[in-house]
Image (tube, helix red, strand yellow):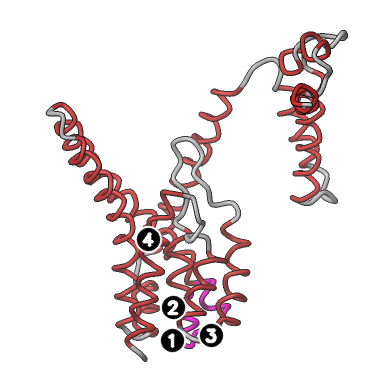
Amino acid sequence: MEIISVILVIVVAFFAGMEGILDEFQFHQPIVSCTLIGIVTGQPAEGIVLGGSLQLLALGWMNIGAAVAPDAALAGVAAGIMVCMKGMSNGEAVALAIPMAIAGLALTILVRTITVAIVHAADGAAERGHIGTVEWWHIIALLLQGVRIAVPAAVIVAIPAEAVQAALEAIPAWITNGLSVAGGFIVVVGYALVINMMANAKVWPFFFIGFALASVSELGLIAMGMIGLCLAFIYLALDPDFNGGGGGGGQLAAAGGDPLDDILNDYE
């Protein structure tokens, strides 16, 4: 095992941990993290195949309202290490990813609890007018999220694959089952919070239309997404609150109906 590969794997894990909060470059998504681990370990094909398999599971893992989803970053990084560096099969790695995602969820809750003290420290620095100190506290809080994945990744790299599997199997079933049930409740509460914020008389019909369409088994996620997008465009085109008036077109119609065309005409 080359030391350079080990260092690069830990770097990938570090960025995946930070991206779990930033959501900018998507390093925490399994399709990205596993591919990067495969590249730095010289097994890009294995990393891409594993990442694609895990991404199908992680599609539903997202933070909704107060709900914190299972951690896709640790799941992808741990599975990538086990396949590309330990020789584990894809099936075994996918099975391993589920408890690792739950473990990552516990770690992110721990880090977020620690950052409460960081927030108070940043508030104190802001009251004293030390803006640079506030910025550093923000950076430290973000780095902790990176360490949250980098340290477990380093541990997984250092110990044999059999030891990792045995440790996971040693966790009592009542703990993992309890975490799964609690996580399900949290997701429901998160969806309820989001619906409560956006619910009004204009969008409730679309909410129930979605439930009705979801019962049609022939419609997949792509078809549902396309229907939802088209309904959104139709709603924006017909609602007077968005198009500037009623049947007469309002101010938008008076201006020509096409803001970009109006700008170009004025320029000419």
Query: Label 3 belongs to which residue?
Result: 43
Q: Which residues are magenta?
A: 80-95
Q: Position of residue 8 (x, y in %)?
A: 38, 76
Horizontal side of residue 194 vs 66, given as left or right: right
Q: Nearer the viewer, mark 4 or mark 3?
A: 3
For mark 4, give the secondary structure.
Answer: helix
Residue at 81 percent across and 36 percent down: it is: 230
Residue 124 lies in quadrant: top left
User: What number is the disc on residue 103?
Assistant: 4
For mark 2, give the secondary structure.
Answer: helix
For mark 1, give the secondary structure.
Answer: loop
Residue at 62 percent across and 69 percent down: it is: 53
Q: Position of residue 99 (x, y in %)?
A: 44, 64
Query: Label 2 belongs to which residue?
Result: 81
Query: Label 1 belongs to which residue?
Result: 86
Counting residues from the N terminus, which is met first, the one under dot 2 or under dot 3?
3
Q: Nearer the viewer, mark 2 or mark 3?
A: 3
